[in-house]
Image: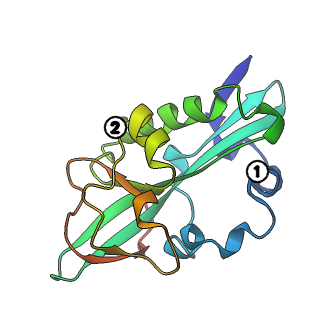
Amino acid sequence: MIRIAPIAAVEPQAVEQLLDHAFGTDRHERTAYRIREGMPAIPRLSFAALAGDALVGTIQCWPILFCGDDGRDMPMVMVGPVAVEPARQRDGIGRDLMLYALNAAVAAGEAGALMLIGDPEYYGRFFGFSADRTAGWRVPGPVDSRRLLALGDSVPASAGMLGPRIVALA
């Protein structure tokens, strides 16, 4: 049986090892890491999936900022990575973690402007993310624009740059 707990309930090194298993040790070079660079994950929106005492999955959410070319900035939440131990990747753990984090964002009043980099067919079909408003967005690194996805009523549909939000959420 899988239990979901706050990510603070597990050792940070265990999270890092799971991320290495799921994404490779070169994961820090990805654009997603540049978007949230220097920011701590948001504790109330970041979770661990545990099978007994074993860490089998995590999801982390990050405070980021959309800096609009029109001078309007929008605080946003970057969802992910969703990491699942490779041997357990077809068990629905990632889906459960995603739903748990999205529900936590709604409960915390932070679901108005969510974004992620991911498969549009999967994240659109199961969670409602789309690239409908992201065409004018820029990021600090390469990205397939169709994988730049957003969800929420406050998602900006204008041109601008995504980057770390200097004032982290408590």
Residue drawn at (84%, 30%), measured in percent from left and top?
Answer: 53
Is disc 2 placed on a helix, strand or loop? helix
125 to the left or right of 1? left
Up-down: is 15 above or below 52?
below
Q: Can you give x and y, in whole percent of width and height, for residue 38 in the image?
A: 57, 76
Q: Can you give x and y, in whole percent of width and height, for residue 72 in the image?
A: 18, 76
Residue linked to disc 1 = 22
Image quadrant assignment for residue 164? bottom left
Q: Can you give x and y, in whole percent of width and height, for residue 32 in the image?
A: 55, 67
Residue linked to disc 2 = 106
Q: Residues within 10 Å of mark 2 (few under 14, many from 20)?
A: few
Location of the N terminus by quadrant is top right
Q: Can you give x and y, in whole percent of width and height, for residue 140 in the image?
A: 48, 81
> Answer yes or no: do the residues labelled 2 and 1 have beta carbons within 8 Å?
no
Residue drawn at (48%, 32%), measured in percent from left and top?
Answer: 99
Q: Residues within 10 Å of mark 1 (few under 14, many from 20)?
A: some
